[in-house]
Image: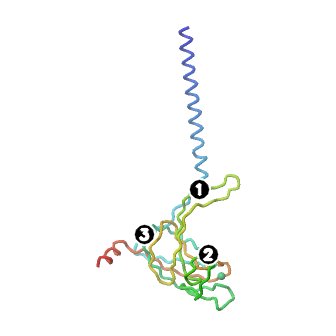
Amino acid sequence: MRQYKHDYFHNLRKTHWAKFWIFLVAVLAFVPLTLSLQKQEPEGLKFVAGRVYRLIAQSNVQWTDTGYDVEGEQTFSFSASGGISLQVGNPMAYCGPDGYDLKTIQQPIQDMNIGALIGKVVLLISIEVDEETGEETRNEIVEIFYIGSNRIVSMPISGRLFLGINENVAGDNSGRFTVDIRLIDRDVQNIRSQT
Ligand SMILES: [Ca+2]
């Protein structure tokens, strides 16, 4: 009887351990499965203070990804040149980085000239991929700001820097702006503000 009792509890304990291991394996198998549903994007390039970077803003797409990441509060000087047409074949629709002397409600920044150089910073929170359709949903915070031909801008948030044209219908445009951008050194900024 005593022996039977011992075997009984021993087997019971073994069953519990077996259940535990099955549970653990199931959990470990599930973790990479859920992680694969959250896509990651590679980090962008970083600006080094004081250096001048020459970037391009294409006019026939609304936004050009610069490939660079910025940090909130970083201050940059922008200097842009070049010319674009806001409507191919229309010689009147030509403008430089300050834009065309017209403001419409159908443009990203409504109180600035149409066609002007603008920028945006996109902070990606997550990319969720629908398992069945493969469709991606990007959860992101977007801040748009004005640049024009010459301006110093403090970044509103951290994220990927895009350059764009202050116009919604970009498909019929031609040309591009050349944009020289320089990260202003924080120490130099501090010295300037103290003097
Ligand atoms: Ca256009």
If the image is split into quadrants, where does the C terminus sit?
Answer: bottom left
Q: In this picture, is 40 found above or below 29? A: below
- The residue singled out by tag 3 in the image is 73
Sort mark 1 into few (<14), some (14-19) or many (20+) by Cα contacts within 10 Å: few
The number of discs equals 3
Q: Position of residue 56 (x, y in %)?
A: 55, 78
SS for callout 2: loop
Three-letter amino acid code of the residue under disc 2: Gln
* Residue farthest along the right direction in this orientation: 133
Query: Do residues under tags 3 and 1 come within 8 Å of each other at their CB atoms?
Result: no
In front: label 2 or label 3:
3
SS for callout 3: loop
If the image is split into quadrants, where does the N terminus sit?
Answer: top right
* Residue farthest along the top direction in this orientation: 1
Q: Is mark 2 within 8 Å of ligand 1?
A: no
In front: label 2 or label 1:
2
- The residue singled out by tag 1 in the image is 39
- Foreground of the two, 150 or 139: 139
Point 68% across, 85% down: residue: 88
Q: Who comes first in sequence, dot 2 or dot 3?
A: 2
Sort mark 3 into few (<14), some (14-19) or many (20+) by Cα contacts within 10 Å: few
